[in-house]
């Protein structure tokens, strides 16, 4: 049975947090809110507990996990050879949605790192997550708390929809704010490389690091187009709802029109269509359900609403989702990365 614990996002009940910490310490799995998405935590020092994460999610074991710490001063317990640049990034962005890939120390079990000699680390910016890590007294390995391949959870309800009965407990601290996962940044080389775009934007990193590169695998839709992704997680179809997703992207003035055309065609062929749009005044007819994700000029809102919109369409039982692309400026890069990886078909206008 999965325990459900409701807590205040800012001032969580200490007794509940201690109980959740104890559950982790004795090898259990606890889902918890972070500022990005909900995570599924296990004691990172306990290989057996960590392997339960993979079983609960159905996650491929060659995809390593992020280790969550309570503050940056703990980083040398799991990583070594931390460069001045890495330290500067930690000082600027932690606690926050930036994960750093650092040289490992070998102290973590192979289940966490998938046998790599690097380790991904972050300090989340959420009182419940930080309280839990502190209460457990150990580093906490945590992927997003969803079934592998489906959209990440931004509420405790999403977590339970995927994992009820498979995990020990979920801490409900309300909806996650950012809505997309942390930026995964490899800082083992001279120039930092973004392996997964997320809550911290390339220009924010550039302002500290001077330069930043994007892994070429970031903006392609499937592994077939990518040449050897450096982040193991990038090679799987990901963030995908149950219904197939068609992404319409390209010229901002044309995506709305093309979206309407495709959605109407699907509807006329008898399918239930979900439309995820950012353009105002889309002209739709037939059996079409429209969700406005937000304004194109506000990628923060689009990111916050993306996963729950995809899950919403699944609940409504649509046969196909047609989604409108947005600019890759700012947080738009993370949103477009997720949409492209979720897409079965991409139409460029
Ligand atoms: O916002 C987040 O990052 C959330 C919350 C819960 O913290 N966590 C999350 O974890 O998104 P997950 O497991 O869904 O994604 C972790 C990503 C994967 O793409 C994985 O391949 C990559 O980080 N990763 C982990 N360790 C790595 C390493 N040593 N080198 C390269 N990539 C690594
Ligand atoms: Mg994930």
Image (cartoon, helix red, strand yellow):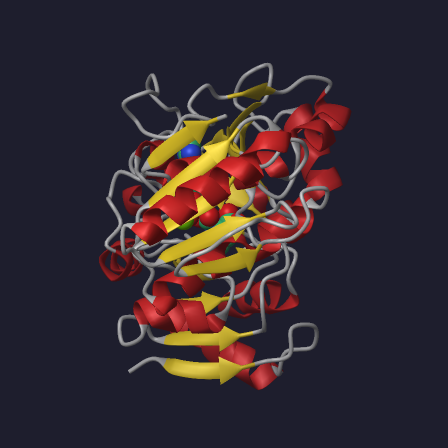
Quick check: 104 above or below 17? Answer: above
Asked whether the viewer can see residue 76, the reply is no
Quick check: 210 above or below 201? Answer: above
Residue in the foreground of this view, choosing between 126 and 109: 126
Asked whether the viewer can see residue 170, the reply is yes
Residue 110 % position (x, y): 29, 42
Residue 267 % position (x, y): 35, 53
User: Who's the residue at 37% across and 24% down the image?
Assistant: 229
Instruction: Locate the N terminus by quadrant.
Output: bottom left
Residue 45 found in image quarter: bottom left
User: Who's the residue at 32% across and 65% down the image?
Assistant: 317
Residue 53 % position (x, y): 30, 58
Q: Ligand 1, what quadrant?
A: top left
Residue 192 found in image quarter: top right
State how many labels appear.
Answer: 0
Quick check: 237 above or below 118? Answer: below
User: Who's the residue at 60% across and 55% down the image?
Assistant: 304
Residue in the foreground of this view, choosing between 240 and 78: 240
User: Who's the residue at 34% across and 80% down the image?
Assistant: 2
Relative side of 218 to 180, left or right: left
Residue 337 % position (x, y): 49, 35
């Amino acid at each position: 049975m999965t325990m459900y614990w409701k807590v205040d996002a800012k001032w969580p009940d200490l007794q509940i947090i201690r109980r959740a910490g104890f559950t982790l310490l004795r090898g259990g799995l606890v889902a918890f809110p972070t500022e990005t998405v909900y995570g599924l935590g296990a004691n990172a020092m306990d290989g057996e507990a960590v392997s339960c994460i993979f079983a609960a999610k159905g996650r491929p074991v060659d995809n390593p996990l992020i280790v969550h710490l309570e503050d940056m001063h703990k980083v040398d317990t799991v990583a070594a050879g931390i460069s001045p640049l890495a330290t500067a990034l930690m000082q600027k962005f932690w606690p926050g949605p930036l994960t750093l890939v650092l040289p490992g120390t070998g102290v973590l079990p192979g289940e966490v790192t998938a046998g790599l000699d690097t380790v991904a680390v972050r300090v989340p910016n959420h009182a419940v997550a930080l309280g839990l890590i502190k209460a457990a007294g150990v580093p906490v390995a945590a992927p997003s708390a969803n079934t592998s391949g489906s959209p990440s959870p931004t509420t405790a309800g999403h977590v339970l929809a995927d994992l009820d009965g498979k995990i020990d407990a979920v801490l409900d601290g309300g909806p996650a704010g950012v809505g997309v996962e942390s930026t995964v940044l490899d800082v083992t080389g001279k120039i930092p490389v973004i392996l997964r775009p997320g809550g911290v934007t390339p220009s924010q990193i550039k302002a500290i690091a001077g330069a930043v590169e994007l892994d070429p695998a970031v903006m392609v839709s499937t592994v077939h187009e990518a040449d050897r992704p450096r982040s193991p997680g990038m090679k799987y179809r990901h963030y995908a709802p149950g219904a197939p997703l068609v992404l319409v992207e390209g010229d901002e003035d044309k995506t709305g029109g093309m979206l309407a055309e495709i959605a109407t065609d699907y509807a006329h062929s008898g399918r239930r269509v979900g439309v995820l749009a950012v353009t105002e005044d889309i002209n739709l007819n037939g059996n079409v359900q429209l969700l406005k994700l937000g304004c194109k000029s506000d990628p923060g809102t689009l990111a916050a609403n993306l996963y729950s919109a995809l899950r919403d369409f699944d609940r409504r039982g649509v046969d196909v989702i047609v989604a409108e692309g947005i600019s890759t400026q700012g947080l738009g890069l993370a949103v477009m990365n997720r949409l492209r990886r979720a897409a079965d078909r991409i139409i460029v206008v």
